[in-house]
Amino acid sequence: MSDAWLPQEAEVVECITETPDIRTLRLRFTDPERQRAYRFAPGQFNMLALHGIGEVPISIVSDVEDVHLFDHTIRAVGRVTRALARLECGARLGVRGPFGRGWPLEAAEGRDLVVLTGGLGCAPAVSVIRHVLRRRGSFGRLTIMQGVKHANDLLWREQYEAWAREPDTQVLLAADVATPDWPWHQGLVTELFDRIGGSLVGAVAMMCGPEPMMMAAGRKLLDYGLAASDIYLSMERNMHCGAGKCGHCQLGPHFVCRDGPVFSWAALAPCIGIQGY
């Protein structure tokens, strides 16, 4: 965008209720020229603003080739996200972005790909999965791994089942606490690496979710033969400006909003998991 500090008006075109506290808003800029010019990369985010309430960073989950609408999946957990989740079709809001560095999907072309998510933080990886499945011939084997604390926390259960039916695609799901109808693994998602079909040597991994989970998974992936430069993490911090100016999202020498939110394991190794970073 020409001015990263000035929100542009967008309209809610469609609302999709995912769970009682999670909704997907499909948006379109009210300025047709702005909408035609808008481009983003998987893994980037927008700052969504409501006048008099506030502004929050939300990942873009739609496909990059959808030039008509852009989607945000929002969990109502705070003042701003609760207000965003209550919006209905026709509502207007401010949008700044896209910001940050997304997933290195071009570097992953022709290679096997592991997409690992934990908790309710799977939204940044949805764009990766959709990107790969719409360009299936450009990538190798796709392994989708999702871990949740409770079986009822699993979002898009039907979507995961649909992904599992795609060619050369494996879906591995885990819940710390299972319910009687839970057909997948009970335990940690990091316990599922030995169920992946085929070698992980030469593969690329993309992860998002709680940092302790990503740290444990990253170490296991290194043990399985992945290079540190082929393991990527989408980080979360308290992002306010989106342009690396306010300092709220600093992570060691990095600013998550500007230098991330996607980082390689090699780049974060000196500071990830250190208290205060």
Image (cartoon, rainbow, N blue to C red):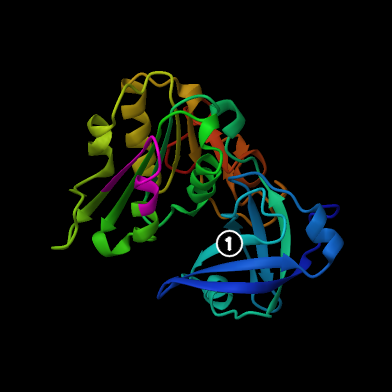
**Residue 176 in picture, x, y percent from top left:** 21, 53
- The reply, left or right, for residue 197 in relation to residue 67 is left
Q: Residues within 10 Å of mark 1 (few under 14, many from 20)?
A: many
Most foreground residue, 134 or 246: 134
Residue receiving disc 1:
72
**Residue 35: within the magenta?**
no
Q: Horizontal placement of 181 versus 89: left or right?
A: left
Horizontal and vertical percent for residue 11?
Answer: 71, 73
Residues 197 and 55: in front is 197
**Residue nearest the observer in this picture, 266 or 270:** 266
Question: Across the whole image, how many numbered discs are drawn on residues?
Answer: 1
* Of the pair 83 and 39, the residue shown nearer to us: 39
Magenta part of the chain: 162-173
Relative to residue 212, is residue 34 drawn left or right?
right
Q: Is residue 134 above or below residue 179?
A: above
The answer to whether any part of residue 236 appears in the image is no
* Residue under the image location 34 percent in, 35 percent down: 217
Residue type at mark 1: give it.
Answer: His
Asked which secondary structure carries label 1, the reply is strand
The image position of residue 264, as x and y in percent, is: 52, 30
Query: Residue at (55%, 80%) from the top-left corner?
Result: 86
Q: Is residue 71 above or below residue 77?
A: above
Residue under the image location 18 percent in, 54 percent down: 183
The answer, for residue 219, to whether it is visible in the render is yes
Q: Does residue 169 show up magenta in the picture?
A: yes
